[in-house]
Image: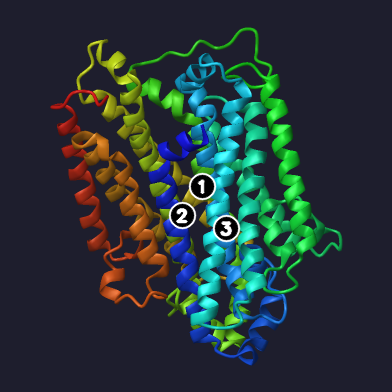
Amino acid sequence: MIRLNLRLKHFFILAWLLCLWAMLAITPSSYVSYYPELSDRTQLLSELQNNLGTQAMYGVLNAPGNIGQLTNWKTGAWLAILSAVMSVLLLSSLHRTAEAKGTGELIQSTGHQRSAVLKAALLTGGVVAAINGAVSTAILIILRLTLTTELTIAGSITYGLSIFLTMLGIMALASIVQSLWGTAHNLNRLGLLVIAGAFLVRVFADTSSQAWAHYLNWISPLGWRSVIDCFGTDNWGSILVFAIASLAWAAIALWLNSRREFNSHLLHLRRAHHAHQRRIGGLHSLNLVMHRTGIITWAVVVGAMLLTFLPLIDSLIPLLQEDEATRQALQSFIPMADFQKAFITYAFQLCAILVAIACVAPIVAYIAEEHRGIVDLIRSAGTARYAPLEGAVVISFSTLACCTFFAIAGGLVALQIQTSTVEEGNRIILESTLNLFLQSLLFIGLAVLIAGVAPRLIQLAWAPIAIAAVVSIFGQVLGLPQEVINLSPFSQTDSASLLMFAAIGVLAVGGGLWGSSLREVYK
């Protein structure tokens, strides 16, 4: 079953891993160019160790601040989160989603025990995590030979092990939560909530003034990277502890899985005896009822993200004022004329990537519904050929509208929380939110066009988001010309360019709906 899982998900796995490895390979060189000598980082290290803003975003940077520690501190923070997201999506698709589709029951009919599906999913995730950790280690060792000896072999190995254990720990915790509350509609959301919870625990552990708080990193898989201290002390004892914890959580997940009914969960919320009868006004109304939880969840995440990160301006500005080297390093990620405005724009840029993913997801899910025969059933009721895809488009635009509203609310509240005053802050928030809205329209349109015309290629709907995100966030680090960076919608703030992107998106939506009215259901 492990080989079958790897074969079924090979495209998904390769796409994720190649992006993660590319990020790891390109960032150490930028740190070397800005800080070639250890003495160049003395002031930076002193500032970062006392800065709550950077500690909340990336964690604590330990002395002496070598290139390996900088890579583990900043790039490692992003890669740990992205690797965790990958592991959750992989686990859900191989285990509980298989139950919801009925393939899990088919596997059991061949004589396999029900636990075999979860075991195979966890072991498949373990194999992918091991590959991710091993290749990450190899990349860092190659960079040691070609770039700098500050990337030690021991640190490279412990970094690979930290990524491996982070993925295992998150998968096991996600499986536990899915056994307790998981349904066919909330599996990925529960997994992402596990990651969000682990992140918040890590943030509290790294920023709290309480002496005991740092021990919380021991129970958060996203905090394990800090405890292991790759390229620093290389705490091998903690690696053993985290490996045992991951195995223990996996055992608990298997036990809970054995206690629940097939395609069900253990904890059921008590409902009122006289439930309100809901009036369904048609296909669009039904879609909104079925997807409302997901829409609200994405919107709350976007609002909470802005509410968390925008107040960090207060702690970052003194750091930039006192350290020219730090300002130059951040210039690669946040081009700065007016730093306050640039940081707000950068935060909204990250949220725009998240919103684009949230809006494209319903279109991709629609093709899965076609494949399962659900769209055939809808069409048999006499609806137009394009109506089911139109319903998915309505969900995408509803998600975009809700995320836009929460982005405005989160941004405006964040401005009130921070102590410093952002000049014309309300206008900047509103303009950034409008940019977010217009940027997402292009990606929705491209996804709908693929779904309507070439449904077999629907996974390519993620490619424009991935390419645009890499160009926008890492374009400066990669040395790309500004003209190339501006081709990414996420990099654009010019109204005329954004309106052009939005117009292309709207036209693509029309083309996709027209294409779906001409073709048969994808099987």
Q: Nearer the viewer, residue 357 or 103?
A: 103
The structure residue drawn at horizontal position 23% and vertical position 23%, both measured from the top left corner, is 521
Do tag 2 and tag 1 residues touch (Cβ < 8 Å)? yes
Q: Nearer the viewer, residue 18 or 55?
A: 18
The residue under label 1 is which amino acid type?
A: Met
Task: Report whether 259 appears left or right of 490.
Answer: right
Q: Quadrant of the C terminus?
A: top left
Q: Mark 2 vs mark 3: which is more N-terminal?
A: 2
| Coordinates of residue 179 in the picture (x, y in percent) | 65, 27
Q: What residue did someone put label 3 on?
A: 133
Question: Would you place residue 16 above or below residue 211 in this image?
Answer: above
The structure residue drawn at horizontal position 29% and vertical position 68%, both measured from the top left corner, is 486
Outermost residue, left side = 518
Q: What residue did someone put label 2 on?
A: 17
| Coordinates of residue 440 in the picture (x, y in percent) | 34, 50
SS at circle 3: helix
Say how many tags the image has. Answer: 3
Numbered badge on residue 86: 1
